[in-house]
Image (spheres, grey):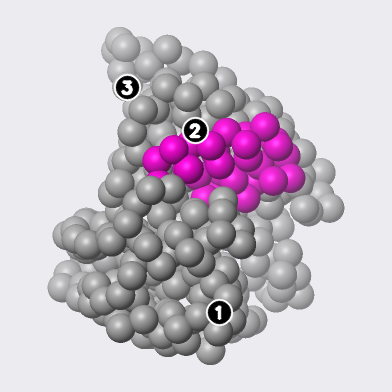
Amino acid sequence: MTHLDATHAARFMALTTGHLTREYPHKLDHVLDGPEDARTPRELHPIFFGSFDWHSCVHGWWQVLRLARFYPDLPEAERVRALAAEMLTADNFAVETAYLARPSARGFERPYGWAWALALHGEMVLHSAPWARHADAFAAAFARRFHDFLPIQTYPIRVGTHYSSAFALTLARDWALTHDPALVTLIDTRARDWFANDADCQAWEPGGDEFLSSALTEALLMSRVLGQDFGSWFDRFLPRAAQGLPATLFTPATVSDRSDGKIAHLDGLNLSRAWCWRGIAAALPAAHPVVERARQTAELQLAAALPHLGDDYMGEHWLASFALLALE
């Protein structure tokens, strides 16, 4: 089975530090309330102005900090620590947090960026560095967004893109286990409301621009929420998984043009499916008939995507984070 090692870590950190401070090209999530709001990415976001878009920069930082902690003696890790000392200042985080108070920012990066912001904070506090707690208020603001929004979100968003409810709740729940027990309770309640009765999933995927499996991401979330009851839920949800059906969930997606930002999402789909299948296999009873097939499928998905992380900037600016999810 393919696992994270120092070679992967060095490659991922080198790729990502190459774009964390690359401001252009950039795709802003920004509402202009007037001409004074027409500002550059760096002016708006003194930390997260790189990596093509805000959320990719956030999870790029999560990735390199995590790898630097796992492999502190690599030369690439030294570069990460130097960049963190320069960028992750209290003043910079204060500006990033203040941006959220704009009236037009209520839906800013919801929910994908919200979840990655929490994941980044969860990683930062594990470091012995002056900047380790600089994101506390930043994370608290995003946690409050989840607390305020989840009770009014009547329906889940069942897609394989940034709007996925299941993906965001999975990351947010992992953070909340340590930092916000009330948010764990809220997430578990919403997940059960939305997904507990799902059965015989047809898995009409992948869509042409999806980087998540809506089916498998839901299953991964429910493996966290249901604990020992997950096996029976999974058997209802994907009753033919032991036979490799629906076949699309077991077959790597074809990526026809990695210079197209949307089509390049499909490399991420293969990586995120590997992450999900490994998590599902770990959550099922050891003797469950899907376990071995899930592990084998994860290997196929990884083999399809790992060689292509740096083929084009449309994938390079974000794929290594999903490779880390899958390998770790």
Residue 79, percent from left and from top: 66, 63
Per the image, the residue denoted by label 1 is 8
Badge 3: how crowded within 10 Å, few (<14), some, or many (20+)? Answer: few
Q: Which residue is at a point 24% across and 62% down the rendered structure image?
A: 203
Q: Amino acid at mark 2?
A: His
Q: Amino acid at mark 3?
A: Val
Q: Which of labels 1 and 2 is toward the front?
A: 1
Circle 3 SS class = loop
Earlier-in-chain disc, 1 versus 3: 1
Circle 2 SS class = loop
Q: Amino acid at mark 1?
A: His
Start and end of the magenta stretch? 169-195
Residue 164, percent from left and from top: 36, 46
Circle 1 SS class = helix
Q: How far apart in space, not on screen, are marks 1 and 3 (Cα)?
A: 38 Å
Residue 205, visible in the rendered structure: yes
Name the one closer to the observer, 290 or 144: 290
Considering only vertical position in the picture, is 33 above or below 221?
above
Name the one closer to the observer, 224 or 325: 224
Does the magenta stretch mainly form a helix, a strand or a loop? helix
Residue 138, visible in the rendered structure: no
Per the image, the residue denoted by label 2 is 45
* Quadrant, the C terminus: bottom right
Q: How far apart in space, not on screen, are marks 1 and 2 (Cα)?
A: 29 Å
Q: Is residue 90 magenta?
A: no
Q: Is residue 171 magenta?
A: yes
Check residue 310 in the rendering and tell me which mark sits there, or answer none. none
Residue 20, percent from left and from top: 50, 53
Per the image, the residue denoted by label 3 is 31
